Amino acid sequence: MRSLDPPEFNLDVESEVLAITELFDGEWHNGGFSQLFSNWNPSDARLVPEGLRRLGLPEAAKVVDDAIAAMGNDMTLWRERGHAALIGSDTELRQRLWALNRAFDPYEKALTAAMERYELMLARKSGDPFVYEDET
């Protein structure tokens, strides 16, 4: 049996909540859920919904939860299955993930705004002198 790499992210560290959601956003824009599962460590992909919840986006997290469920229980196969969906050899999974991409579309702007708010919150907490009080 294949082994999984441990997650690279620790969501108990606030800056890593921002990092994983920003990386997810870029990967999703690049090729959707197929691309995400083809490229990412499954242990990290499983953290994305919680990261979205911590940004205040529970509905977006549900869509990612559904994409994770579509990948099946054997996380050691996620990269293989994601790649098969990406190149079209697993057309059933490809169709399911693309439907979930469309379901995630309405949250795109909310995700960007939530990441900006979260980054500003982190900057304020750190005492960043370049954060102005009128920024919201």
Image (tube, rainbow, N blue to C red):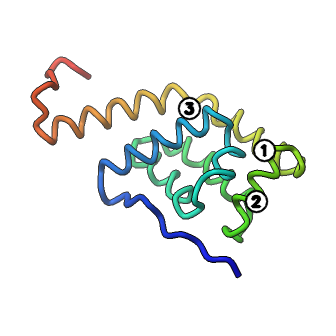
Characterize the local packing of mark 1: few (<14), some (14-19) or many (20 or more) Cα atoms within 10 angstroms.
many
Residue 116 spot, x, y in % from top left: 35, 30
- The relative height of residue 84 versus residue 72 in the rendered view (above or below) is above
The residue carrying mark 1 is 86
- Sequence-first disc among 1 and 2: 2
| Residue at image location 74% in from the left, 53% down from the top | 82
Which quadrant of the rendered structure holds the N terminus? bottom right
Q: Are marks 1 and 2 in contact (CB under 8 Å)?
A: no
Rendering coords of residue 65 (x, y %)? 62, 54
Q: Along the polypeptide, which appears first: circle 3 or circle 2?
A: 2
| Mark 2: amino acid | Glu
Residue position marked by numbered label 2 in the rendering: 80
Q: Which residue is mark 3?
A: 107
Q: Residue sitting at 72 percent across and 41 percent down?
A: 100
Percent across and percent down for residue 98 are 77, 39
Tell me how far mark 3 sits from mark 2, CA to CA. 27 Å
| 74 displayed left or right of 133 | right
Q: Nearer the viewer, residue 57 or 84?
A: 84
Residue 34, compared with residue 70, is above or below; it is: above
Circle number at residue 18: none
Residue 12, quarter of the rendered image? bottom left
